[in-house]
Image: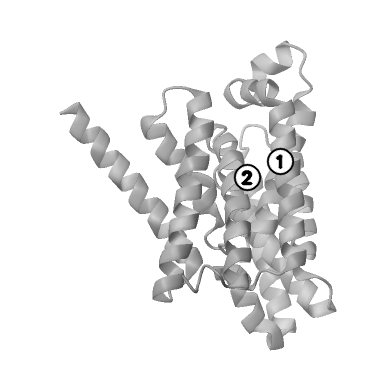
Amino acid sequence: MELLSSEFFQRALLGGVLIGITAPLMGLFLVLRRLAMIGDTLAHVSIAGVALGFLVGVYPLGVGLLFALAASFAIEKLRKTYKTYAELSIAIIMSGGVALASLLFSIGRGFSVDINSYLFGSIYTLNDTDLLVIGTVTLIVIGAIVMQFKEMFLMTFDEDAAAVNGLPTRYFNLMISFLTALVIGVSIKIVGALLISALLTIPTACSLIVARSFKQSVVLVVLVAEFAVIAGLMIAGFWNLAPGATIVLLLIAIMLVLMMGKAAVKR
C-alpha cells in the first residue's frame, strides 16, 4: 500500500491510464487499415528526436513528438507516391529514423543512459510536464475520434467508398497519421519505443478474437489496455520489474488466454 501512496507511482498510473486510452484506439484504426507497422516506424523516428533533444538541451519528449509528426506526414506523402507499394513508405521512413538515431547516438554518447529510458520505457520518471503533454494529447485524440467517428469508420473499412461519398480522404489520412504520431510521441517514455507497437496492436488483436462489431472493438481495446497497464504497473512495482516489459507481456498473456478460450468454446 505504501507504493500506491507514492507520488511517482501515482503519476505513473495516471500517465499509463491516459495512454491506455489513446494508444489502443489509434492502434485499432491502424491495424484495420493494415498499417500496424507504422507504430514501430514513428517510434524509431521519435527516438532520433529524443536524442537530438538531449544533444541540444531541449525538452526531449517534445522534440521526439515533432519528429514523429514530421515522419507521419512524410509517410503519407510517400504512400501517395507509391500507391501500389504503400508499405514501402513505412520501410523508407523507418530506415531513415534508425540511421538518424544511430548518428545522433554516436555524436552524444554521454546521454546514452538517458536514451535507454526512452527505448525501453521509464514510466516511473514521469514529471508534471510529461503528464500535461500526455493529458493534452489524450484530449485531442478522444475529441477527434468522437467528432469524426463515422468518417473514420468509413475510412478504415473502405477508403474508396469514402471518396465516392465525398469525404476528403486526404484530410482524414493526414488526421489519422497526425493523431498516431501524437500518441506515439508521448508514449515512448511510458512503454518505450521498442515496445509501443505492442500497446498499439495487441489490444486490437484481443478485440478481434471476441468482438462482434466495430463498436465492441472500440470498447474492448481500451478495457484490455487499461487492465494490462494498471495490473502491469502493480506487478512491476511490487516485484521490482521493468514496467514497460511487464505491461507488454501481460497483454500477450491476455491474448493467449482469449485465443485458448475461443478455441475451447468452439469444441
Task: Compute the Cα span from label 1 to label 2.
Answer: 7 Å
Count of numbered circles in the view: 2
- Where, quadrant-wise, is the C terminus in this rendering? top left
Q: Position of residue 66 (x, y in %)?
A: 80, 57
Question: Which comes sooner in the sequence, label 1 or label 2?
Answer: 2
Quarter residue 163 falls in: top right
Question: Looking at this rendering, what residue extends furthest in the left direction?
Answer: 267
Residue 117 in the image: x percent, y percent? 60, 74
Task: Name the outermost residue toward the bottom.
Answer: 110
Please give the label number shown on residue 233.
none
Q: Residues within 10 Å of mark 2 (few under 14, many from 20)?
A: many
Residue 210, x across and y down, in percent: 37, 31
Q: Is residue 262 above or below residue 105?
A: above
Residue at image x 70%, y 57%? 185
Label 2, secondary structure: give it: helix
Left/right placement of residue 140 relative to residue 44 reads right
| Nearer to me, 135 or 68 | 135
Residue 141, numbered circle: 1
- Contact, CB < 8 Å: mark 1 with mark 2? yes
Identify the residue at horizontal 61%, vertical 27% (top origin).
156
Disc 2 marks a residue whose amino acid type is Thr
Is residue 174 at least partly visible in the picture?
A: yes
Among the 4 quarters of the image, the one containing residue 29? top right
Residue at left 50%, top 72%?
3
Residue in the picture at 42% in, 33% down:
208
How would you rate the neighbour count of disc 1 (Cα within 10 Å): few for under 14, some for 14-19, many for 20 or more? many
Question: Is residue 96 visible to the viewer in this orientation of the structure?
Answer: no
Residue 186, relative to residue 110: is it above or below?
above
Q: Nearer the viewer, residue 218 or 172?
A: 218
**In the image, what residue type sits under mark 1?**
Val
Disc 1 is placed on an element classified as helix
- Residue at the disc numbered 2: 22
